[in-house]
Image (cartoon, helix red, strand yellow):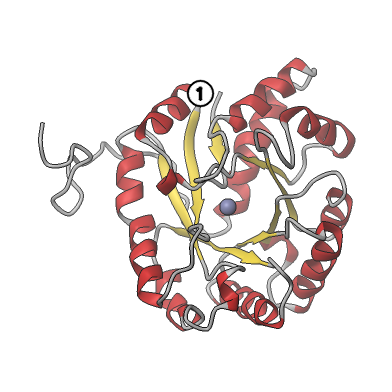
Amino acid sequence: MRIFDPHIHMTSRTTDDYRAMYEAGVRALVEPSFWLGQPRTSPASFFDYFDALLGWEPFRASQYGIAHHCTLALNPKEANDPRCTPVLDALPRYLEKDGVVAVGEIGYDSMTPAEDHALAAQLQLAADHQLPALVHTPHRDKLAGLHRTIDVVRESNLPPEFVLLDHLNETTVEAAADSGCWAGFSIYPDTKMDEDRMVAILQNHGTEKMIVNSAADWGRSDPLKTRKVADAMLKAGFTEDDVDQVLWRNPVAFYGQSGRLQLDVAAPDPLHEGNSILRGGE
Ligand SMILES: [Zn+2]
């Protein structure tokens, strides 16, 4: 079984996670840039983070046989902080880089005017760079947030097939599917979606344009949720081809629109800019 995790924050995870993911079948992933849990105080802090998502983290993933890509953006929460918004002006030069397969995570957190501006501006950046966009839907006021998100996507120059609406659930799947966008589901250990609810959604709505991710980060989360959904699908009677479509071909088709997916992992270099994962010793 081959698995593509289209949304996981590996910066927050350990090398044990990389090993376990490889053993579970994960061969490729996308790491979206996001909120670190505490506020950044300057754009420079974003740039160091973006550089790590383009350099150190793909290096670390390659040591475990996993192809790493990223999405870059000013995240919805920090779009409200005037100390951070100059990141928007620097994004064009980052979006030129080979490892960037989409603009993201963008979208709404609290649905403020500053978030309206950042979302519209970054959808335009995606259109300008012919990149897809990973759009986070709000955790509160989910359905209202989704409708507003879809309205902004419709008013943008980015076609809906270039948009992945993420963190969906039973209340938002219908509207997301009707919009023509791709539908993303984050499977968490104790909140939002779990694997059995995910299987029920696939039974009710089919497997076209459906994408499943672990969204594992620094909070309570599980980087093996993609595999657990695959196993639950098989148990519920889905075929191996259905599983391959949802866990591999769909995310490959979505991010492949960037023209930048690189699914073969080259033999890993022992060093990245003179540093190894062995911390200098051994
Ligand atoms: Zn995320």
- Residue at the image point whose x is 72% and y is 29% from the top: 195
Above-or-below relation of 194 to 52: above
In the image, is 252 to the left or to the right of 166? left
Residue at x-position 65% and y-position 81%:
114
Say few, some or many: other residues with alpha carbon within 10 Å of mark 1 (under 14 / 14 to 19 / 20 or more): some
Between 161 and 41, which is closer to the camera in this rendering?
Answer: 41
Of the 4 image quadrants, the one containing the N terminus is: top right
* Residue 277 x, y percent position in the rendering: 23, 40
Residue 246's quadrant in the figure? top right
Q: Is mark 1 within 8 Å of ligand 1?
A: no
Q: Amino acid at mark 1?
A: Ala
User: Toward which corner of the image does residue 164 lie, by quadrant?
Assistant: bottom right
Q: Is residue 262 visible?
A: no
Closest to the observer, 165 or 126: 165
Query: Which residue in the structure is indicated by mark 1?
Result: 24
Can you name the residue that lies furthest to the front here?
38
Q: Which picture quadrant has residue 40? A: bottom left
Q: Nearer the viewer, residue 267 or 22?
A: 22
Q: Total label count?
A: 1
On screen, residue 117 versus residue 49, left or right, reads right
Measuring from the top left, give residue 265's x and y in whole percent: 36, 39
Q: Is residue 148 above or below residue 237?
A: below
Left or right of 181, for residue 21: left
| Image quarter hosting the C terminus | top left
Q: Secondary structure at mark 1?
A: helix
- Residue placed most toward the observer, 89 or 12: 12
Q: Position of residue 100 (x, y in %)?
A: 45, 60
Q: Residue at x 77, y 58 (%)?
A: 140
